[in-house]
Image: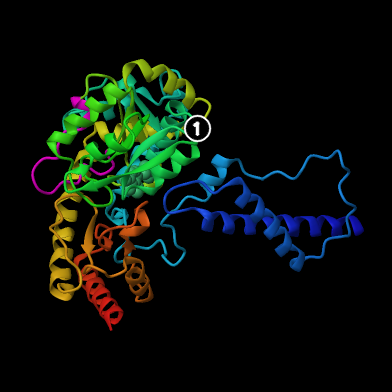
Amino acid sequence: MRFQALMLTIARIRLASSCGLKWRLASSYTSSGTWPSRTSVTASVSASTARSRSLAPLPRQAPPPRDQPAARPVLSTRGAAMAGAAWIGDERWQDHPHAFQLGMPDIEQFPWRLWARALGQRVRPGLAALPGERDPAGYLPLRAAIAAHLGMARGVRCTPEQVVVVAGAQAGFDLASRLLLDPGDPVWFEDPGYLGARAALLGAGARPLPVPVDGGGLDVDTGQRLQPTARAVYVTPSHQFPLGVTMSVHRRLALPAWARRAGAFVLEDDYDSEFRYVGQPPPALQGLDDSGRVIYLGTFSKVLFPALRVGYLVVPPDLVGAFSAACRFTGAQVPLLEQAALADFMTTGDFGRHVRRMRALYAQRGAALVRAIRLQAGDLLEVRSAHAGLHLVGWLPPGVDDRAAAERAAAAGIEAHPLSGFAMEPVRRGALLLGYAPIGEAEIADGARELAGALRRLRR
Ligand SMILES: Cc1ncc(COP(=O)(O)O)c(C=O)c1O
């Protein structure tokens, strides 16, 4: 019994200190993207130990013998940086679709029956019936289907072997960062930019450096001035996340040219280019590059559904072996059943039909949101037309704090992420990011009314 009581006390202390550590790490991330120091991590461990005492009294302990090593931080510096990185997660938001959920497609519109059929057709004969060796870079027919789709839709030039299937673009950021970067390597990073990519770079020990984004995308000249010898650059050239701008032709040429000169890699994140409502999306940088410096990343999270956890990289021919080998030793691989079913889903045309249907639907919803905001909140939020993607940027009047506005919106039950939450440097003008894809036009109109009411209360 005494032994059980002791074990229970130890378990409580462990739980308390792990909770305390997590809290401290989350709050110790600095907006400039720097790491929490080891000292702050150590301090947080001792603070949490102190807190654990109030939960369960520690038995009196003899001081550790002199020859015992000093207490060390629990997490590595890289681990602490990754665990403490900023993220948009917030338990206030339930999973069901609501206004204005960011980055989510409408999963109720997904053809689940067709997907179940694709899975079933692969399960029935048994996976042993799948041909070929288990390549860690993915199931070759799926890689071929992705290469064909990217060639046609995005101007990507690659063989099926250059496509590496991974568990979402996030796994791709992680793999590319660890394979190509050493701890301390500077990386140009779009500011504002995608938090998931930034966290993966931090997890690899790299140093994301904020490079401003303007109407023409990432400012390549400023990047060259700030850090001409950076090891890599992370960009979303087709539809910048979160501002939604398209990179100018001049910069699309200048960026790979700089990468060639500097011996750097371009990490091109093409996360939502299937959803372009006006004209054609500009071709991917990968197709313009002859020097083998571009690593192209894509995902099925927006175009199908995020829980599928399938993404891909297109890597230069001389890196195929390294990426493929490294996949074996990471958790990046996708189960074969889903890969085979997805290959069938693409080659039968179900994928293309779904994309076309959703493109038309999201175009209508984007237009509905622009109309509703202009009608309900034209004096409070400035929105430009939704020409691509799944969200809009609503610019607040100059001087209005977007975090305070987001809090007000949240209190009214509306999800509206502040632009400054994605920025490393202070933003010049605050804005709210408004997702429109997962909800119908009536909910969009209701949401705009609620949001307008919340923002008016902020002004009083
Ligand atoms: C800019 C950007 N890149 C990539 C992703 C996709 O990540 P994943 O494939 O890991 O779901 C997202 C998802 O929200 C995103 O917003």
Q: Is residue 426 magenta?
A: no
User: Quadrant location of the N terminus?
Assistant: bottom right
Q: Quadrant of ligand 1?
A: top left
**Residue that badge 1 annotates:** 183
Report the span colored magenta: 270-288
Secondary structure mostly taken by the magenta-highlighted segment of the chain: loop
Quadrant in the rendering for residue 125: top left
Whether residue 1 appears in this view of the structure is no
Give whichever of 128, 97 is nearer the camera: 97
Give whichever of 98, 25 is nearer the camera: 25
- Tell me, what colour scheme is on the image? rainbow
Where residue 433 sits: x, y (%)? 28, 60
Query: How many residues crowd mark 1 within 10 Å: few (<14), some (14–19), many (20+)?
Result: some
- Tag 1's secondary structure? loop
Query: In the image, what residue occupies the spot 38% across and 36% down?
Result: 187
Left or right for 375, reference 235? left
Where residue 346 sits: x, y (%)? 26, 34
